[in-house]
Image (spheres, rainbow, N blue to C red):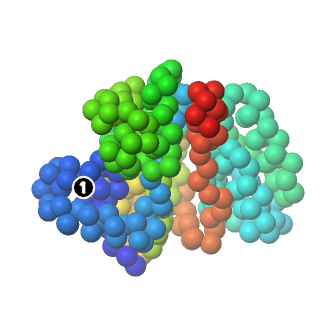
Amino acid sequence: MLVVDPLDKALLWELFGNARVSFQDLAKKFKQSFNTIKNRVKRLEKLGVIQEYTVELSMAMLDLENLYVIITTDGREKMTDLLDQIGNLQQVRYLYRSSPNRYACGTFVTGTADFFQLKQSIESLKSIEKVEFHPISTFVPDAPAHSKVRNRGNKVNFTQNQLKVLRCLTADVRMSIGKIATQTELTPRRVSRILRELQKGGGVHFTMRMNYLALGDVELEYFIRYDEMKTTPRQIIEWVYTQYTSEFWHAFTFLDEPTLTVTLLTNEPSRIKEITSRIREIPYVRSVTDFLIPEQHRGGHYRDPTQHQLDELFKEAGLI
């Protein structure tokens, strides 16, 4: 098992919130040396925890809605084939089998037509018995407030110069201001101002894609139903986060029923029973179903609808 300590985790979320943040600024924020921060980040890159740095349009720009999909089968499917079939659908961002006959996936859809296309695609597969769609909100307390998991962003109209800078950033989101200036024929001062405008405007996120499972930890998912008359999902999530801060990664709150999911990672499998027992004792929780997700039960891959939309903007601006 690999170990991620609080500094590693903090660095991951800082880079997730702003992939352009410098090692120098991170060193100052966390009161570490420049080399310590650089070496930590490079290690996370080498391990594959940091998969890539990228620029993405905000959810508001793309009119995206986040849906959590629960799929029940008759048990006759071949797991690897079904993971491939569902994972290859364009709306699917991640997918895993949580238990026999049960799969779950996260999706982004744009509008009613896109939703029904996804619904029909999944329901038409062999062995599928039931498909549930739940709109969700994401709770990641360690992520910065401006990051894409905590902020839908805004709809904005980009200027020609902003698009020139974004064109550079799609090739390398951490590209230096000097290199951007050279490629765009703008002054470094102008480039700096545009970068601030882009971040403040909320139309894009400078972010990175991470695979926390590359740490080798055991992934636990808790599917929790609660009494909405006596508690709130926020109270439950905050209790879990307070008790298991180092293990906590994210939570999803269902917007259409009193249900939430919490994902924890642990490098101590012997603690799983104790963690599960304590979560089941949370006041006003009606039921808790726990899932241990092995790597081989995962499928699909992270899809970003951003690049196609950005290319369309660049074409309209005559930049490609």
Tell whether 136 sits left or right of 81: left
- Residue drawn at (28%, 67%), measured in percent from left and top? 40
| Front residue (pair 92, 69) | 92
- Residue drawn at (58%, 40%), measured in percent from left and top? 306
Q: Which secondary structure, mark 1?
A: helix
Identify whether 261 is placed above or below 306.
Answer: below
Figure quadrant of residue 186: top left
Figure quadrant of residue 200: top left
How many labels, in total?
1
Amino acid carrying mark 1 in the image = Phe
Residue marked by disc 1: 23
- Residue drawn at (19%, 53%), measured in percent from left and top? 24
Quarter containing the N terminus: bottom left
Q: Position of residue 248 (x, y in %)?
A: 37, 56
Tell whether 22 sits left or right of 277: left
Q: Position of residue 88 (x, y in %)?
A: 73, 55
Q: Position of residue 277 (x, y in %)?
A: 41, 62
Identify whether 197 is placed above or below 295.
Answer: above
Figure quadrant of residue 33: bottom left
Residue 69 appears in the picture as rendered: no
Residue 295 appears in the picture as rendered: yes
Quarter containing the C terminus: top right
Tell whether 182 sits left or right of 318: left
| Front residue (pair 137, 223) | 137
- Residue drawn at (40%, 25%), measured in percent from left and top? 201
